[in-house]
Amino acid sequence: MKIKAITMYGIRIPFQEPFRISSGVARNTNSIIVKVVTEEGYTGYGEAAPMDGNFYSQTTPAQCWEMLQVECPKLIGQKFSQPEEFAKLVLASPFARAAIETALWDCLAQERKLPLYGLLGGERRKIDCGLAVGIYDTIDELLAVIARYLERGYGRVKIKIQPGWDLEPVREVRRAFGDIPLFVDANAAYSLADLDVFQKLDEFDLMMYEQPFAAGALEEHAELSQKVKTPVCLDEGVADLADAKKVVELGSAKIVNIKLQRVGGFGPALEIQRFCYKEGIDLWCGSMPELGVGQGAGLHLATLPGFVYPSDLGPSLRFFKDDLLNPFLEMDRRGQIEVPTGFGLGLEINQEKIERLANAKACWHKSTIKAS
């Protein structure tokens, strides 16, 4: 396939409610939607969803936009025939790279008349959805939110923790909801000095501790893993294949959360997935969260072998007040989402809504190669 045109759009949609984790509060998505059109007539979409400031990553939406403005014009006229050729895409931000690469995978799968999971090597199945809830001012607020969403069928609950908000919320969730599948996500808010917190949390029969320490603290995670019963899961701690290999070498974790945004798209994600699956590291698919374009991409990733835990992927209106899909992604009463079976991402993107909601736009075409 040969790239004919690329357009990118800045999209800002409010959260249903502020989403608070140990490192900050998010109130809106600032997603960048990348649309790629090929000479052969295929249209692919990808999404970059960095949060404002340093909420999760060092890349801001503005920086991501600037990187894409530099890279997108270079792709006009380029040809791609195999997914391995996407490896030549090199951007400083994995978020920006994930957006372009997802759109290219989408186009290539359409050209081959395959759903994206077929091109990736996955199998058609429903994906289990897990509930992720943030930090609240009171335990009562936390319990009320969990109760409301459990009625909709979610397969497990993840609660965000931080120093001073850990043992009590977990104890009260267990007391209120019994033996539901439950785990905690620290977003790197702790250190080995807090070992006693995790040893005390062991009594609550949790599925995992997600990212207790800083991203680079793989040796510290290995020590924690030796001193607690609950499996350790790494998110920010596995940015690439090299990190995954070090995790196995050190024994830092038994579980890895792969986010397309964090690792830079399907190519890097596949490297991590294949290695972890071979080494017996269990996987699940996380979310920033993204709008429907990014969520849909994650659904295809989650069909691959090794993804055994419920994902953070969910219906369109779980986090945001609107979405760009028609129809929206929906979860059934058993807490699952059907992976789209059409060619490529298999999503119907509402282009009219994208144009209407865009607060910024840039486009490049083989005849102009300039931003508008």
Image: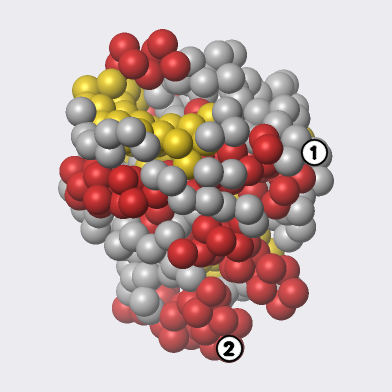
Q: Quadrant of residue 215?
A: bottom left
Q: Say whether marks 2 and 1 touch (CB < 8 Å).
A: no
Q: Nearer the viewer, residue 40 or 52?
A: 40
Of the numbered discs in the image, which one, if any, rests on residue 249? 2
Q: Residues within 10 Å of mark 1 (few under 14, many from 20)?
A: some
The percent position of residue 185, horizontal first and vertical second, equals 45, 54
| Number of disc labels | 2
Relative to 197, does residue 159 appear above or below in the rendering?
above
Residue at figure coordinates x 76%, y 45% from the top left: 118
- Element on which disc 1 rests: loop
Q: Quadrant of the C terminus?
A: top left
Residue at figure coordinates x 67%, y 35% from the top left: 110
Residue of label 1:
125
CA gap between label 2 and label 1 equals 32 Å
Is 366 left or right of 358, judged from the image as shown?
right
Q: Tag 1: residue type? A: Arg
Is 219 left or right of 280, judged from the image as shown?
left
- Element on which disc 2 rests: helix
Q: Nearer the viewer, residue 229 or 336?
A: 336
Determine the residue located farthest toward the bottom in the rendered image: 249
The percent position of residue 325, horizontal first and vertical second, equals 52, 19
